[in-house]
Amino acid sequence: MQGLIYMAIGIVVGTGAAFTGLGGGFLMVPFLLFLGYPAQKAVGTSFVAILIISLSALAAHGRLSNIDYTTGAFLGLGGLLGAQIGPILLEHVSTGQFKKLFALVLVCLAGYLFFNA
């Protein structure tokens, strides 16, 4: 039963990720934190789900010709380095601090998008 609930959440996150391009972590991480995961495990676990969701979304957007592969590749190459730095930094942040920082990032992003629409 728990697996079915996780799959239902995955459908919601996958839809949100493919629609917004935010990868789904903005939905998946709070869900895992709500379930009691520490910040480090919530972030790491979300990447497993996001990998699968991202590959599926890539295929769907590719079929619709909605991809600039060159720009995506350069962003991804830079992201490779950032993806190694992020977990190291996260090891020095408590779950409580992470929740506040994560919420602040989401609020700032929401404000930027809202006022620059």
Image (cartoon, rainbow, N blue to C red):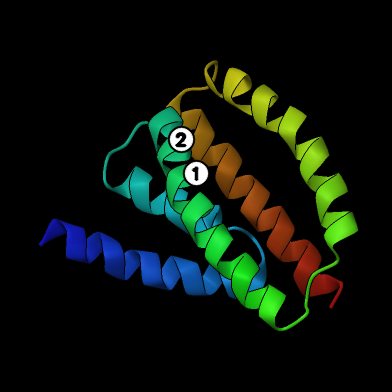
Q: Residues within 10 Å of mark 2 (few under 14, many from 20)?
A: few
Residue plotted at (67% across, 66% down)? 21
Q: Residue at x 29, y 65 (%)?
A: 7
**Residue 112's spot in the image, x, y percent?**
80, 63
Toward which corner of the image does residue 114 lie, by quadrant?
bottom right
Element at badge 2? Answer: helix
Q: SS of the residue at dot 1?
A: helix
Residue at image coords 68%, 80%: 63
In-image side of 110 versus 74 (left or right): left
Q: Residue tagged by mark 2?
A: 44
Identify the image quadrant of residue 109.
Answer: bottom right
Tell me whether circle 2 and circle 1 mark residues in contact (CB < 8 Å).
yes
Q: State the separation of the CA atoms marked 2 and 1.
A: 5 Å
In the image, residue 41 above or below residue 103 = above
* Residue identifier under label 1: 47
For the C terminus, give its image quadrant: bottom right
In percent of width and height, residue 93 lies at 53, 22
